[in-house]
Amino acid sequence: MANINIIDIIAVLMMGTSFAVFGLRQYRHSVLAYALQTLLLVAIFLALYTKYGTHELLAWSVTAFIIKVVCVPLYLMRLIKKLNLVVEDEPVGGFFISPVVALSFSLAVAMMFYKVFIHFSIFKDVLPLFAASFIFMMGIFGFILRTSFIKQILSYCLFENGIHLSLALMAYTSHELVEVGILTDAVFAVIIMSILAKRFYASYGSLDTSKAVNLRG
Amino acid sequence: MDFVYLLLQLVSAIVVAPLFDGISRKLRAKFQSRIGPSIFQTYYDIYKLLKRGRTKSSSTSYIYQVSPYLLFICAAAMFCALPITYGAQSAPLSQFSDIFVLLYLGALFRFIFIVAGIDTANPFAGVSASREGTIGFYTEEVAVICLIVVMMGTGSTSLSYISSLVQEGSYGYAVPSFSIASTAFLWVMYVETGRKPYDLAEAEQELQEGVLGEFCGKDFAIIDIAILLKQMTVLGFFLVIFMPWAGLVDNPILSLIIFLAEIGFLYVMGVFIDNFGPRFTINKGMKRTMLFALAISCTSLALYIMGI
Amino acid sequence: MDILLLILIIPFVCGVVMFLMPQKFQILQKVHVVLSICVSALLLSAVSKVVNGVQLSIFHNFIFLDSLGAIFLSLIAITGLLVNIYATTYMKWELEDGHINIKEVKNYFALSFIFTWTMSLSVLCNNIAFMWAAIEATTLASVFLVAVKNDKKSTESGYKYIVLCSIGLAFALYATILLYSAANGKIDGEAMLYTNLLANAANLDSMALKLVFIFALIGFGTKAGLAPTHTWLPDVHAEGPAPTSALLSGVLLKCAMLGLIRYYAVVANGVGFDFVQSIMIVSGTLTLFISAFFLIRQHNVKRMFAYHSIAHMGVIAFGLGVGGAIGLFAALFHCAAHSFTKALAFCSTGNIAKIYGTKDMTKMGSMIRIAPLTAVLFGIAICSLVGVPGFAIFVSEFLIFKAAAVDGKYILMGIFALALAIIFIADFSHFFLASFGKVEGKVEHNGEMKLSENLPLIALAILIVSFGIWQFDSFTFLLDESVKNIVKQ
Amino acid sequence: MQTIYTLFLLASLLSLALYKKPLLAQKVGFGLASVISLYAAVFFFSNFDETLIWKLPGNFISLPQFRLDSVGMFFSFLVSFIAFAVSLFSFDYAKFYEKKANLAVFASLFNAFILSMLLVIASDNVFSFMLLWEIMTLISALLILINDGEGASKNVMIYLGIAQIGASCLMVALIIMASIAGTFEFSKFDHLEMGMGMSITLFSLLLIGLGSKAGMFPFHVWLPIAYCQCPSNASALMSGVMIKVALFAFIKFSLLLPQFAYFGYILLTMGALSCIFGIIYALVSNDYKASIAYSSCENVGIIFLGLGGAFYGLGTNSPIIALIGFIAAFFHILNHAVFKSLLFMLSGNVFTATNTRDMDALGGLHKKMPITSIIFFVTALSICALPPLNGFASEWIVYKTMVIGGIEEGASSRFFFSLAIIALSITGAMAIMAFSKVYGAIFLGVARDTKCVEEAKEVSFSRLLPLGLLASLCVGFGLFMNDVVSILSKIVLTIIPQTSVSTYGFISMPIIVMVMVLCSILPFIFLYLLKANNKEVRVTDPWACGFIYNKNMQIGSNSFTGDIRKALSFLLKHEQEIKLDGYFSKVVYTKKTHDLFWEKLYAPVIDMVMLIADKIGIFQNGRTNLYAGYILIYLCLVLIFGYYYL
């Protein structure tokens, strides 16, 4: 019983952190929130491992910890420092409205999705599944509503986390190479996006991607 | 032998045509309380023209030179297409006396008329050439609608065959569409003779015959004859289809005489309409009067289509 | 060593070798051509084995090459080779004009091998999750092929490319996870292998499969450029260098399509063809019409071709939607036909941009007099794109019509014909604008390119025409085999 | 048969190979074309009764087989014969386009065009037919572009656009037919089983597909645009024979369908409309080439009337109507090929001499180009269907068909056939006006714009020779009408159920001519007998009511049609502009007639598409956030669609 509670609690905490990643104005805080969330993710892996005794999850939690809790946030921190940025620009709909919209829509979509997922999932835990789709949707809404490039990188990381969680819940039995492949992609994506962010900053003078509307029609 | 009769038919028509014209001129003069010319005046006119010298406009080309003869050929051939001295049994000529041959020879006449008018570069000639074409546009479809009824009713386009059918009485006024068509057709043929309210045949420089403004001398004489012949042909066209009584006589010469008399009668009667009607501008005239003809012909066609 | 293993290694090694080359254009050019030929020869030899009826697989079927993959692998080999050869010419011009520096050229060449490598990987993967990873990797590998320059537009296009493709592919990953969890335990053997899934598709839960297909459509559809998730495509194709656009449009889109086709096969065999066909019809029709209308007012030659890519992805989707053996055959044939055609089209825009110094077609004109060969090649590309008979694309469009007629789907024929007619008219008017009339702008390079520079283009043109009229038995064999695998009659 | 095709291919390639020497290429290309097409004409003519089959070796897609039966032979003969005349004409004419395009390309395209037409006729497979059909279209489009210039690409686009719409319809129809037949070879298509609705739908699709290429109403809008843009020899080929190829295909495919009387009615209606609208626009246009082009629409209408009768006959199992109808159609196809190509070549002569297409600038050209003028006169008579020329001969048979068809019981057949006759007669009346105007305005009177006509001179002999040849055919086909008919009836009998009846009372053209000759003697006898004045003719200025004559007084092509324009104002849309500045200055009066169907039928559709194309850009406005939103929205929509509708 206690274990279930722990997993549920962690899941709720993850949802909270994802909201924080999305909503916090300062980049540093966002990145820290992300790191925290990933830590919670690792915690869920471990909890699931202890609960169900699946060895794959242990290996996953280790790789995830190294890559996503340590490397990626550090890299992003370095990027923020290099670009000398503190606060993000005004997102679509303003700082207040945008998280609310994202939150409500994500909740709605997640409500819809998790019922479907529970149908197939190997683990029949409701809350983690809900959290997975919620985090994923928060990530997507990060792209839809946030205009800051760094925020978008973080959004990418967010939905990546969501997928990771659902992967752990629904397909943990798959080949280890799968996990490696997906994680490698994620890391490379973050690296490439940050290189692009630097270039973007160099040519546009800010990270506001809503300025990038030269190509249209 | 058929050809000899045909030649006779043609020559006699040429010979008597000026006479009819003279009579109608005399009659018109009487209506207008004038003494008027002698009934042989048209002969004198033609003879005088033959003796006159000629001028031509500097713009003219070969068309000007050949058009009188071409016009004459067309008119004469049209007249030959009327089966008067020959009938359906004459093998070679019945292949010639065809409704469409007649209509398209008329079209050829019109074509040359227009081209000749444009060739002279005379402003009047040009205008009247245009009017000639316009009148053709108006009359042709009414004529053809009437003829459709006849052609489809008899199942043939051969004039000699149609007139023999009507003579025998196996097809004729008992058919309502036929009788209605005859009215409209007579109207169209009257228009084709070039009289008021559509035209004034004897007044040169008027409407259609402005084309002839630059013609003179013997050329003009030939055109005159051609036009007279054409007028007779269109009336004869009516007679051959709708009143082919001349053909009832077996003797070709006798039937020719009856036929010419009939044409003469119609020709002279035309003066009555001619003299009492008003004159319109071409578009107005056509719209006011041809619509009736069109309506009548369409009625007869509708009757035919419904099988009445 | 096994040939598949070689394919997994050699292109990557080539890329690394290119990185290590000295910064001298002459050397880079030669090495690039030689290595490209080697890689393509390798890929083609693998394909030839499949043509002879051998099914290749290694690592317990983790990596495999079936007839379906062989089609796409041969595209990577042939189109990739010709485009890579053209790329050396194009980069020479860019260097001469000072648009880029030698270091960027080197990186470009190196990355193009990595790109080829990731694409081959995506074709060869039997494991669907790994296939997904490979397709995502193609995006990552090609970002800097697109954003070669450091300017605003280039960066913007790279940004849109990576962001939108990543979002889209995230859904594809979801589809993968769902499929796996739906299949896990219900089928024998590893539940992530395509071959297993296809063989046991009938055992799977139909609701799950439907959901999977919808997610896959969004995911791979974004990458493949199906409307309305195509939005990144015109920007990226228009901004990248001509050879990159040729590669992206000619090969990459097809690889993404291959992903979709694999899901199509599994789902269709699970829940029946009706479901997937109707979804694909909707998607195809939408794509065709949206791109057709965008095409009409498109005066940028590369953007025009980009919208064409979308339109033709629509055609492929439509072919899959019409379905049946013939429809599938047509869709697969269209992948090949469009690959050659689009490669030629984009490469010829390289020539055109060189001649006029602009991509705006309203500023061109009279190309037929300035550079007749380029104009003819451009014309062949256009003719093929709009489906003029005698060129490759017509064959597949004809077959789609045939498939629809055989199934009695007459309304679909009408829709398809209408869309093609709009595309035809829009396109030819642009072609005439550029090729005939007077020069509206200025001419920067008055004259035809050298024949040696045009050789890859001519080769592509010959391919297009020969595929349009000639029947290649080995190719047809591959298509037939793949269709048989999917339709299973 | 394959030798001919190969030879054309070689000629085309050879002339392209001489790319660097355009003048030589012109001589070689067109010379070869004329020789080969003469050989081809002889070959096809001598094999009228045979069916030749030829399979293309090699592994081509769907293994194309080429097959020529009697009808195919006839059309192949037509193509190659007209091609012979036109290429002979081009031998000298093409030089005029030296500055506009490379003559080697011109010659090569010309050869390829002939080849493609011949192959279209022979192809016996849906795939190869569509392939060759579109290639034919494309080559003709390129031929139009030989005369590259202002607005050329737009004009070609209109042509190609309509052709493409047609080709789509055609392809859909053929593929449906093939899928019903279960084979792609036309020769194995017999007995397609389908209901009436399907059959009529397919028939309509075929009619749109092939009629649009043939210039049928309402697809006629491309005719004046494309033909005016085209070099005259190419337009001669296009109008003379390409249209016929479309008609051939139409006849061939429609015969494969189950026959119904409705086919006849559809054809009669479309034919009648084409006739009337074609000739109205031919009448009012001021550009002689446009006039000639519009008259193609008219003539195609006449051919459709003949075909309408024929299909009616097939649908109602009355072989005699079918026989006469097909003879009428084939005869008019033959005649139209002759006089329309002739007219276009003549217009090429006029254009090279004067460099203008505006009839209000021309006039009095007869004095400069007498032979061209006389040939034009004969052709004009022929196209107006005046006896005793060939146009009349075929039109008479068309009339005959209509009359025989109208005798049938049943109101609908009577109605449609009467309608057809009326249309044809109106057409006849207007054609006379149209072509007397064209001839008069170009060749007669005084030059309206002296600058244009001053430099004009008669063209070379090599250009006049083919014209003379075709003109003599105009006369010959008319005179020997019955012989032509008996040859045609042999061909026609291969495609319709055998009929033993052959006693149809045709007119006899020799007798008409004989009577006319007889009549022509009369005036001379008459003049001789009455001793007419034969003195030298005095030359003066034309009479002008006593004013000094001015060349602007004569009637122009615009004012000539004034009355009829007024009468038809409900059908014609014109723009009238009168510029008056000051009392004493010259009045500038311009009048332009627009094609009603372009404005009412095509322009709105084009505008709407353009509007959508303009507005759709909003969708792609560059905002990445929005694009990301699309993905999500689309996902939701597809989920809804997938879950609730499937």
Image (cartoon, coloured by chain):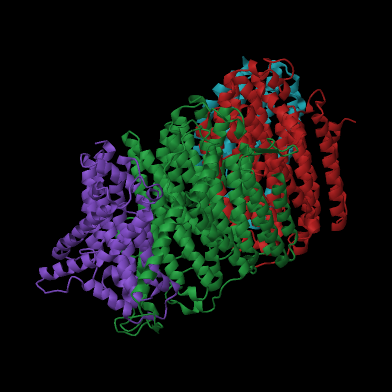
Chain colours: A cyan, B purple, C red, D green
Query: Where residue C120 appears, x then y in whole percent?
Result: 77, 37
**Rendering quarter of residue C72:** top right
Left/right placement of residue D65 relative to residue C57 reads: left
Left/right placement of residue C361 relative to residue D550 reads: right
All told, the count of numbered labels is 0
Q: Is residue A59 visible?
A: yes
Where the N terminus of chain D falls, by quadrant? top right
Which residue is at a point 27% across and 50% down the rendered structure image?
Answer: B251
Left/right placement of residue B190 relative to residue D367 reads: left
Between D527 and C307, the residue placed more toward the observer is: D527
Query: Where residue C113 appears, x then y in whole percent?
Result: 80, 44
Left/right placement of residue C217 relative to residue B119 reads: right
Answer above or below: position of C254 versus D567.
above
Which residue is at a point 21% across and 44% down the rendered structure image?
Answer: B179
**Rendering quarter of residue D310:** top left
Query: Where residue A90 appears, x then y in whole percent?
Result: 54, 49
Between C71 and B306, the residue placed more toward the observer is: B306
Q: Is residue C438 visible?
A: no
**Rendering quarter of residue C485:** top right
Query: Where residue D434 appears, x then y in whole percent?
Result: 40, 61
Answer above or below: position of D375 versus C431.
below
Q: Residue farthest to the left?
A: B33
Between D487 and D586, the residue placed more toward the observer is: D487
